[in-house]
Amino acid sequence: MNNKETNSKEVRLKNTHVPDKVYAYSLQVRHAFFELLDCTDTEIVSIEVFDDIAIEKDDGSIEAVQLKSVLSNNNPISDRTVDLWKTLYNWLIAVQEGELDPDKTIFKLFIAADRKGNIVNLFSNANCPIKAEEVWEKARTAFYDDTGNEKSMGDQYSLYVRGFFNPVNKPSACNIIKNFKLVTIDSSHTKALYNKFCQKTIIPDELLEYAFDYILGWIDKKTAKLIEANHVMSISYSEYKAQLVAITRELNQKLSLKELAPRPSKEEIENELVILKNYLGQLDLIECDYTDKIEAISDYLRASINRTIWASHGDISESNLLNYEEELVKKWNNKRKIINLTEKSLSPEEKGNLLYLRCKDDSLNIDYLSVPGFFTPGCYHALSDELIIGWHPEYKKLFKIGCEKDGTSE
């Protein structure tokens, strides 16, 4: 195949793609999500039932939404565009055939771009019968002269304009204008949707993006299944809410704090051994060996550094840490009492070692955040370093401190 034939084939292939149509369908799915965010429990959002999108309200009214996607510089709401007049004409027919009650319907034109139009602005600002009739008359002058003769119009939209400005249809047209609402956005629809989701959804910030992607995918999948089953494409707010709660819980369960600091070096561990802090002295009292101490130093340093980083990043708060330490102390105290009651034959050193091992193996999350394995034992070591807790039953006497630092009862 020569270059000329190749280029010709490429052109033909490219012409078979219709990105506007693909985008228009995906826009309907996203906009169903967009409207769900403003709904209450019993309200329903549908696709391609009453309109591109429709919201069935609690009071029995309907919000009929016509979506206009814009992927280029075209303006779907300019005064002489086909899109505008076809939309208004279709609403007119729906009203006259009884598909939409003009007294119980909001006619919304949603433009996924920042576009303007003189006539639609007039219509959007006319929210009473008198004003609606005034702007109908004013807009009609763009297409008819003072004697009622038709001005020059494009063949693509002339049929729709004639229908909408036919004096016979004036009452229905004015009812549409009275309840007409124009909405435009100055950013991409996806960005506007995500921002609205973040504003409307009360879940932790770190879950927002994951929850957003999940809900968007759920709506797309649900509507596809409804199409395949030849059912009406509709989603109730209660269904949406149930999915949001479910994915939030699932993400909460999976959410964990990640280790952000490098592991301590051999030199840092050796320096800690030389200093011989209280938490290491506590391990000496229960006759822990060198390996136990090295592991304790690593856990202590890793927990301390990562705790500082997480706090600086806003991953955990000061109150989170205070509550966490209080919970650790409670667990330590309960385990200590149980051992004293059940292991009376053990020596003080053995009781202390058993208490230490049980606490070290006890992983405790920070609220909904799971923590790395080193964190809980590292925090226990920090508490033991401050002599708030201890492993040996007589650690207070052995360290010659008063009970006021302990905060626990025997």
Image (cartoon, rainbow, N blue to C red):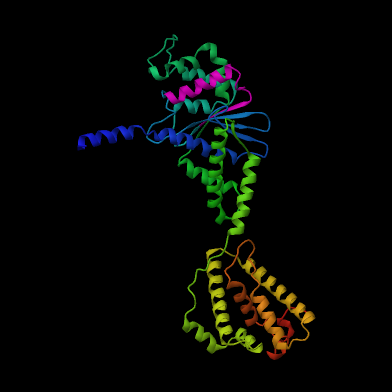
Residue shown at the point (54%, 79%) measured from the top left: 298
Marker count (numbered): 0
Which residue is nearer to you in this view: 365 or 1?
1
* Above or below: residue 237 compared with residue 396: above
Which residue is nearer to you in this view: 238 or 308?
238
Query: In the visual, does 275 lie left or right of 389?
Result: left
Which residue is nearer to you in this view: 186 or 91?
91
Tell which residue pokes out farthest to the right in this image.
Answer: 341
Residue 365: x and y in percent read 63, 66
> Residue 166 in magenta?
no
Quarter holding residue 22: top left
User: Quarter holding the N terminus?
Assistant: top left
Quarter holding residue 9: top left
Residue shown at the point (52%, 12%) measured from the top left: 167
In the rendered image, is residue 324 in sight?
A: yes
Query: In the visual, does 374 lie left or right of 146?
Result: right
Residue shown at the point (51%, 83%) measured from the top left: 269
User: Quarter holding the C terminus?
Assistant: bottom right
* Above or below: residue 156 compared with residue 200: above
Q: Which residues are magenta?
A: 82-109
* Above or below: residue 331 compared with residue 237: below
Query: In the visual, does 109 lie left or right of 14?
Result: right
